[in-house]
Amino acid sequence: MELLTTQVAIIGAGPAGLLLGQLLYKAGIEHIIIEQRSAEYVASRIRAGILEQVSVDLLKQAGVDQHLKEKGLPHSGIEILTNGQKHRVDLSALTGGKQVTVYGQTEVTKDLMMAREAAQLKSFYEAQNVQVSDFYQTPKVHFEYQGKSIQIECDFIAGCDGYHGICRASVPQDKIKTYEKVYPFGWLGVLADVPPVADELIYVQSERGFALCSMRSETRSRYYLQVPLNDRVEDWSDERFWEELKSRLDAESQKKLVTGPSIEKSIAPLRSFVTEPMRFGKLFLAGDAAHIVPPTGAKGLNLAASDIAYLSSALIEYYVEGSDQGIQEYSEKCLQRVWKAERFSWWMTHLLHRFEIESEFEHKIKQAELSYILGSTAGKTTLAENYVGLPIHA
Ligand code: APR
Ligand code: PHB
């Protein structure tokens, strides 16, 4: 067995793990990333595409914002379509000038991977049977790599291994509590090289269900439809997809919609999930390993980034200043922000989707709530300040 030592072992090379690696590298803290998939697989996953300013700032701090600056599209508003009418939520005007940036998570991942390669930082891709142990005393990571058995001894383990990872699963049952809500529908997503139907995102509430018109660039669109949970991708030809999307849009957007062959098509279930606490001795959970939000509020990637903001500064404080205060406070600080984003994502999902089980009364109340929110500056401000992202408190 080969024995290695490092300061921080990071499990998982998604956006959370890669961003943490880059921030630790910048601060001169040694680390190793262990990922079970291949680099090609990680770099090709299609995910969400909205960055809060907090996330943009963190990528800048990590020194990986060059492409983001060139290709990211700043958006100062979103549209909400209900009852066949579009209502603009002027994010910037309602939040004292804040905005969001449209930039694919796939691109964020690729930028981070390139920076990592350029700095020749150590990563093990395609690691098998990854195990973490002894994280209340002397943390160890064990895995197989190219037929060899490897053990890493480290000061800390960062569990950035997503919802299905092994870090959360390795915590003793009596030390962890999880909270979960599963929604009775999924999102069918299509990526296509066609110009977006509008300059801004359109969140659609319609009698036929929710839809979202998003984009990746001026020539690439990302669209979503609320679909029943048991639908399969094979049930949805491109033609059927475009027709259904059109039927949920307003007359102007129907005319403007440009259709074309899909480059990617997939169905994702919607889930709200939170783990408490987020630290177990010297094992930290971050990103999807600790929490999941339904995509309606565009918070998944941004929550992963804010966890990493807290975790990187806690580790820097520990190694550079010799203080463990950030480590002690990590879980509580993250969870305060996590629960607020969970609430917002749940609320947006609830408000904009069609639920089979809801009574006519509940449906009417929801319509009234949406109408109130969109007709009131206070209502729109609530939506806008959550959408652009709540502050990260020091
Ligand atoms: N060992 C090593 N790596 C693992 C293991 C394991 N046992 N299990 C999972 N992984 C890897 C996955 O292959 C993946 O590359 O951990 C990584 C986790 O990455 P993500 O799922 O992207 O999670 P995270 O980095 O927290 O990013 C959160 O991704 O899913 C979206 O909506 C989510 O935008 C949010 C963001
Ligand atoms: C996306 O572009 O993929 C996207 C945008 C906004 C969301 C969810 C997904 O709320």
Image (tube, grey):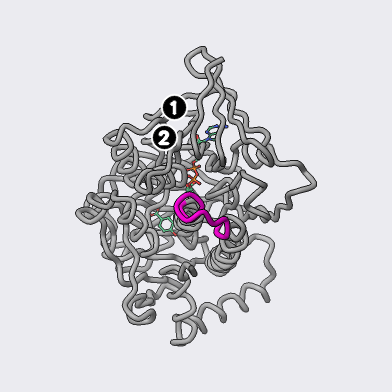
User: Circle 1 sits in a helix, a strand or a loop, which is it?
Assistant: loop
Q: Examine the residues drawn in magenta and state their main secondary structure.
A: helix
> Disc 2 or 1, which lies upstream in sequence?
2
Q: Is residue 236 magenta?
A: no
User: Circle 2 sits in a helix, a strand or a loop, which is it?
Assistant: helix
The residue depicted at 56 percent of the width and 15 percent of the height is 1
Front residue of 148/104: it is 148
The magenta segment: 316-326
Front residue of 321/249: it is 321
Q: CA distance from mark 2 to mark 1?
A: 9 Å
Contact (CB < 8 A) between labels 2 and 1? yes
Tag 2: amino acid: Val
Residue 55 on image: x %, y %: 39, 58
Which of pointers 2 and 1 indicates the residue nearer the eye?
1
The residue depicted at 75 percent of the width and 41 percent of the height is 172
Front residue of 16/100: it is 16
Q: Tell me where residue 154 sits by quadrant.
A: top right
Residue 358 on image: x %, y %: 67, 66
The residue depicted at 34 percent of the width and 42 percent of the height is 112
Disc sitting over residue 125 in the figure:
1
Front residue of 168/268: it is 168
| Residue located farthest toward the right when viewing the structure as drawn | 174
Question: Is the CB atom of the residue marked by disc 1 within 8 angstroms of ligand 1's nearest atom?
Answer: no
> Callout 1: 10 Å neighbours few (<14), some, many (20+)?
some
| Residue annotated with mark 2 | 42
